[in-house]
Amino acid sequence: MSFKTFFIKLLLPMLIIGLLFSTYSSVQAGGGPGTKPELKPQYMVPATPAKSQKKVIPVEGLSRTNLGIYIYQIDNLKWSVDGSCYNPNTLLDNDRTKNRPVKSDICVILDLDKDVYKPISFEDLRTNSYSLSDLTDISLMPHYMDDTNYYLEGAGMPKLVSVNGFNGRKTRFTMQIGGDIFATDAREYNRPKWSADYIFRTDLYWKALAEITKEINLTNGGQLRIKEQKQLNATVKTKTGDGSFGAGTNVNSGNGKITWESSNPAVATVSSSGLVTAESKGTTKITVLWEKDDFKLTTSTNIGVENAPGEPEDPGQGGGACTPNIGPPSQGTTMNKSDLDPNARGVIKADNRDAERFDVLKGIPTSESLYTNAIADNYLFDQSWARMTGKTTYDCNVTLTYEREWTIPGPEVCPPKGACSPGPPVKTGDTVTKPYSFQITRDYSYWKINKLEVYNIAKATMENYALPGTMVTMMPSGYTPPTLESQNDEAVESHVKPAPTAAISYTPPKRTGGLNSPPDVPDDTSLLKGMAESNTPQSKVNNDLVIFNNNKVMDDAEATKDGPTPTNIPDPTPIGRDVLYMPNNMISSTLLNKANTTSSGEIFYNLLPGNVNGGANKVLPIPGINTVTVHTPVVNYSWVSDDQPHNQKTVPDPSSSALILERPFIVRIPTSGQHMDVASYPGYGNRDYAKYFRIKQVQFPFDVYNANRSQFIPAETWVDIPVNQLDTGFYLPVWVDEGHYQVKFRNIAENAPSTFTTQPDANTNLAHHVATDTVPVEVIGRLYDFHVTDISDYNWENVFRKQMGSSAASGVSYWTGTNGIDGDPRGNLAPFVLPIRPGSHPVQGFRNIAVKTGYHVKFDLKTKGNMCATCFAITE
């Protein structure tokens, strides 16, 4: 039957069965790796109110996909698996009676980074929906797959046996195809070769992070006059996933909960809608807090208040205020430190750890198990702290009114007689208003986070030919991951809080001049500046916050003028050896012997929440993993029984086992014996290797029967012997030609390919999967049932003839012994046994008669085996 005919006849019933049964029928399907992880709740970064805040929402999406495995026949009609985990591709044996692959479990690597495999919608723990645009692309990864909802046991469908793991957006899984599992499609592509597809339906689960980032901005406060009002507007802008910020939305009222606060209401108040009213000279900080949907955004601005224009000053008095303006900072000293090298190392060795039975560099058999073990740093990090320095400039505006006094000549005094003379001076004066503008500064410094990345261990993988599915995944066990909390704000206003300065109040002393000499108005700039300096404390500052493993690396506590110098994140330490450890990785009994198979490994580190300008999850190599040599041992030290008691040869051949025609014999095929030297190859040596045998076989160059002669075995036929059966009996038929032969034995390892090579005694060369032996035997016939039937001596006529003078034989014979060829009683009794001597005559009176010489004797005998005219003779 052609593949196509087979496919059509069997696919239609399969499709009908698939329609009749619900997808929730009882199934035995595969999935993995492990069990599907639970979704985690959302979290905020940073966790406390900030100017910008990110909501990180773990989500999962389901893609119902059709995955396909493509196979094709090569010249020898075996089936090659496209995309196999192995290089070269896996080859499947062909069932030539049906021209289809035998049932096989195959490992396949498939790239899932295609839109057809990705979900279009995602849900969080609260079943809220998200689209692809809400996600960060770097976080979108497949993490679980199964066919539970689709596979029907017994319906001839391709079966997902296991999912070995995901590496980025690639998956490695094992499928069962061939045999009674139907191909979904098949086609002849180069007669007589065919190709075929096995398509199966699966639920493919993707994990990702939906990110919503919001940032609040506030109108700049500036300078106000007393009783002046100013409307401050708070706006919030949003971006999702990897997108850009959209336009800001006014949130002053009616859009979330908003709280306004003035640090000094005596200077200026702020309403619930953000309207600022200046009350008195001085400075204040206006802070807004907006809360909605778990977001808590806050920012602030400074307001300075001075006299209203035209407002009179008290005579002889004056005053003013200083309004702070925070100047932009400059980056100074940086503290950079990183450790992004995991110092990873790993081994693949034979179980059990610390008591390894085999040295995998030299060889380990199939059906033995391996352990994988990786050591690496318990975390990775990359930090960059920057000291930001700058100045807060206070713009001071003071108006002083100077009271001046001087004299002018008084009215003339004219005596009745004489000339008039100037009268006594008269006081006069005025007030002069003089504005002053000057600046004072206050230095500030604080530390901010330029970069903060901390990574914890997520898992490690190792790949080697000998591992199940060629790859294993080690999840951390007993691992304490690092903890990280951070707060970061780029806005200088969040770090520097100018100290409020007291209003400047100064009454200049009266200025007195002379006659007709008004006093000059002094320049009191230095005086006023000194008063402002003394009235103005240093700014309050605070750093960004970094808490690592519950220790403050960067302290955000409020400080005066200079934020405290942070420390560095401490160096990581190696994890314990049990953290990434997986024992009991059984080497498949189907793997061929192979020397020095290379190993590779990767360790996965996940970026912790709380990172600042961080990168992405890291996949780093585990270098230097040892090679593994797969070498399944078999030995063959066989033996054939030597039937010496029945060997009638006058000179037996000591180098051959004697096999006697029509006699049973035994072959012994032990499973123990010497393999490679145990000192150089631990686990081998002289021992029992039955565990690794697939079958034992013997081949005779002549026909035989089994022990009870119920089965005929033609010559040159390999006979299977159960592995645990030491001795097996056979029977040698009479028609076998006598002569010397070689009996062949072969012991086949469990991992032997269909076409194998052999080595005598033991497969110490791993290129061979079969141990052979040959035992020389000699097939020997038999002479038996010799008896004397007549003696021409007249004294014996009454024994061998029916009557005296008659030629008719009486039937009396003298036999060799009383037993037949195989020891059974013949029935003849004394005196009818050889030799014939006095006392052998049965007739009374003839007892003492012997046979005289010169008379002929007749005898009869039987033979088993070959007779030829020139090579056999009876001699004296």
Image (spheres, rainbow, N blue to C red):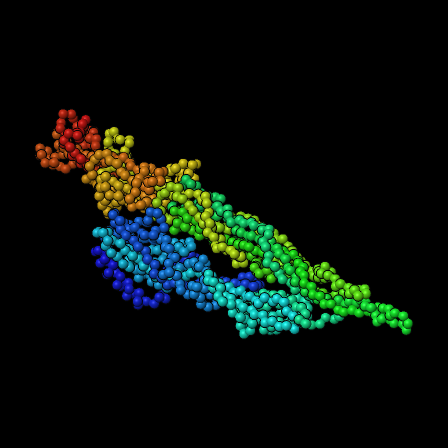
In this orientation, which residue lies closer to the viewer: 660 or 353? 353
In this orientation, which residue lies closer to the viewer: 85 or 118? 118
Tag count: 0
Residue in the image at 25% along x and 29% along y: 651
Side of 814 where 179 appears, left or right: right
Q: In this view, does 440 lie above or below 126?
A: above
- Where is residue 551 shown, x and y percent of the image? 60, 55
- Where is residue 497 shown, x and y percent of the image? 64, 62
Side of 77 where 500 appears, left or right: right
- Residue 147 shows in this picture: no
Residue at the extreme bottom of the image, as rendered: 254
Residue in the image at 67% along x and 61% along y: 438
Side of 430 where 596 appears, left or right: left
> In the figure, residue 234 lies in which quadrant?
bottom right
Residue in the image at 72% along x and 59% along y: 526
- Where is residue 324 shown, x and y percent of the image? 64, 63
> In the figure, residue 227 lies in which quadrant?
bottom right
In this orientation, which residue lies closer to the viewer: 498 or 688? 498
Residue in the image at 49% along x and 55% along y: 615
- Residue 543 shows in this picture: yes
Q: In this view, does 607 lie above or below 318?
A: above
Residue at the extreme top of the image, as rendered: 854
Q: Quadrant of the C terminus?
A: top left
In this orientation, which residue lies closer to the viewer: 236 or 371? 236
Q: Is residue 780 above or below residue 60?
A: above
Side of 755 where 783 appears, left or right: left
Q: In which quarter of the image is the N terminus?
A: bottom left
> In the figure, residue 290 lies in which quadrant?
bottom right
Q: Is residue 673 above or below residue 180?
A: above
Residue at the extreme right of the image, as rendered: 417
- Where is residue 282 shown, x and y percent of the image? 68, 67
